Image: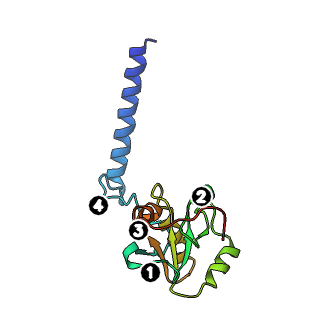
Amino acid sequence: MSVKGVLLRSLVLAVFAGLVGFIFNLVRPQGLDLVAAEPYEIYVPCPITTKEAVPARLDELCEDLSCLFVVDARPEAEYQEAHIPGAVSIPYDPIRALDAEQLSALRQVKGAGILVYGDLEINSGKLLADELASAGLRGVRFLQGGFPAWLEAGRSTQSGSQP
């Protein structure tokens, strides 16, 4: 059998199957809609993240951030290279949830709240802050513009490991 013959038979079979399906759908009392009544919701909020942290601009915060518990959501290597003075490193990992020990320690924080900052590549500061807010922590904010906004404002940095 030639290629042309195979293609022709395939086309006839596909058209026949489509017609049978269409006719069957017309005859059914509760046939399927051929066109959606309303657009499909492709992008919906993640059901895990139910709360969102509040954004904070740099000019809204106290100058030295001593009133806040500061969390760096960037990878550990970036934290060691440079970070906001006094910040604690809790790298954001979209695959692993925060462990119970970290959440318990953050729940003990007193004061004006928690400020999370990160990078702009994946917006790790906002993502970690949202995760903390969803875990029930109150007063969680994220720094708009992340660490690049801190650097751009000419604020001081520190290098090295955890304080």
- Could you say which is closer to the camera, residue 67 or residue 21? 67
- Type of the residue with mark 1: Cys
Q: Which of marks 3 and 4 is in front?
A: 3
Give the mark nearest the N terminus, 3 or 2: 2
Q: Nearer the viewer, mark 2 or mark 1?
A: 1
Give the mark nearest the N terminus, 3 or 4: 4
Residue 26 in sight:
yes
Q: Residues within 10 Å of mark 4 (few under 14, many from 20)?
A: few
Give the residue at x 58% y 63%. 92
| Cα gap from disc 3 to disc 2, whole angstroms | 18 Å
- Type of the residue with mark 3: Gln
Q: Residues within 10 Å of mark 3 (few under 14, many from 20)?
A: many
- Could you say which is closer to the camera, residue 154 or residue 111? 154
What residue did someone put label 4 on? 37
| Mark seen at residue 75 | 2
Against 148, residue 57 (above or below) is below
Residue 150 occupies which quadrant of the picture?
Answer: bottom left
What residue did someone put label 1 on? 62
- Type of the residue with mark 2: Pro
Residue 57 in sight:
no
Give the mark nearest the N terminus, 2 or 1: 1
Give the residue at x 60% y 59%. 95
Q: Nearer the viewer, mark 1 or mark 3?
A: 1
| Cα gap from disc 2 to disc 4, whole angstroms | 45 Å
Against 72, residue 105 (above or below) is below
On screen, residue 31 versus residue 124, left or right, reads: left
What residue did someone put label 3 on? 144
- Could you say which is closer to the camera, residue 131 or residue 60? 60
Give the mark nearest the N terminus, 2 or 4: 4
Contact between marks 1 and 3 (CB within 8 A): the answer is: no
Give the mark nearest the N terminus, 1 or 4: 4
